[in-house]
Image (cartoon, rainbow, N blue to C red):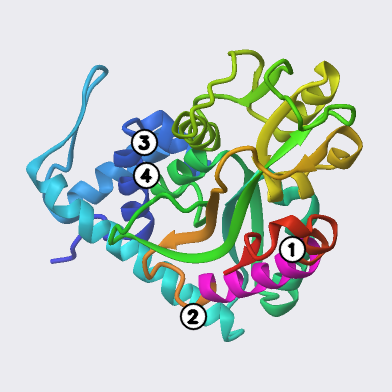
Amino acid sequence: MENTDPPFTFRAAQVFVAAVEAQSITRAAHRLGIAPSSVSQQLSGLEVALGAKLIERTARQFRLTKAGELFLEPARQLLDDVTAAKACLVMADQMPPMSVRIASLEELDATVVAPWLLALTKTFPNINFTLNSGASHENHEALSSRAADLMLAVDTVGQVDWIEQYPILRDPFVLVAAPDVTMTDLSDKPFVRYASDLQIGRQIEAQLRRSGRQPARGFEFSSNQAMFAMTAEVGGWAITTALAYFGTPLAADLVRVHPLPVPSFSRRLALHARSGALGELPERMAEEIRANLKTRIVERAAEKLPFLEDGFQVL
């Protein structure tokens, strides 16, 4: 007798994982670029193919069943295994193009991203690279929800088994000030901050507290460009990083860079990927961005800001 049950498909597993991680049929559809009805159809077909109810979904509830909980990790592993196999084939020039989505940082957009992607395209002509920029916490969310395949972010993830990390840069903090501000007394000058919901903002505030400095609250910004512009406008000062300064267009026209008035500290940037999901590709991509960081930013910084010494360093 002919079996008329829907077959198990990779696409159905992909839709299932997206729906679980998004906790919504509509949000999963948006992420996958398909209609919500297609998501529902794929889920129903998967449940028939497996012979088990995976998700309890009503207008008010979206919950995994016991079978769904058991199937989730194998489904995630399947997605990573297939992606890794595709990456292996495409790196060997043995298959049609694949897409790799990168979540990047604002600081890299104007200086490193374009030459990095051009070099990658020459090395891997079968890969279509797409890139969106955001804050580190936004990039981590994109990677964890599979909205991105790799992320460039501050290395605060810690050791978790589902992420592999490739350190790329030690980025020291520096003081920036309006051109007419001297370093003899900053106490009467406005202090311009990063927004408190940004990791960089929290790291700066923690170092200021440890050093016994607590400048008055004032303007807070989420972008480097806006923060530098306001610092110049109010004749104030701010703390940022060497990469943020060199990676922001016109920053040198707005502010001057000085050594910190507190003990030196830095952050570390890394390229992150889902463990094993892209084979050797993340390591190759990390090598390429290190080379671009070295020639386009770090070597220039050594000439213009010698006080950084080896604090600004490709890893």
Residue 214, compared with residue 289, is above or below; it is above
Of the pair 210 and 284, the residue shown nearer to us: 210
Q: Residue at x 65, y 65 (%)?
A: 310
- Neighbour tally class for label 4: few under 14, some 14-19, many 20 plus, Cα within 10 Å: many
Callout 4 touching callout 3 (CB < 8 Å) = yes
- Say which label, 1 or 3, has the lower sequence index: 3
Give SS at disc 3. helix
Q: Residue at x 64, y 37 (%)?
A: 261
- Neighbour tally class for label 3: few under 14, some 14-19, many 20 plus, Cα within 10 Å: some
174 is within the stretch colored magenta = no
Label 3 amino acid? Ala
Q: Which mark is residue 22?
A: 3
Query: Circle 4 is placed at which residue position?
Result: 18
Label 4 amino acid? Ala
- Say which label, 1 or 2, has the lower sequence index: 2
Q: Which quadrant does the C terminus fall into?
A: bottom right
Tell me the distance, in whole angstroms, between the alpha carbons under discs 2 and 4: 24 Å
Residue 241, x across and y down, in percent: 66, 45
Q: Which mark is residue 88?
A: 2
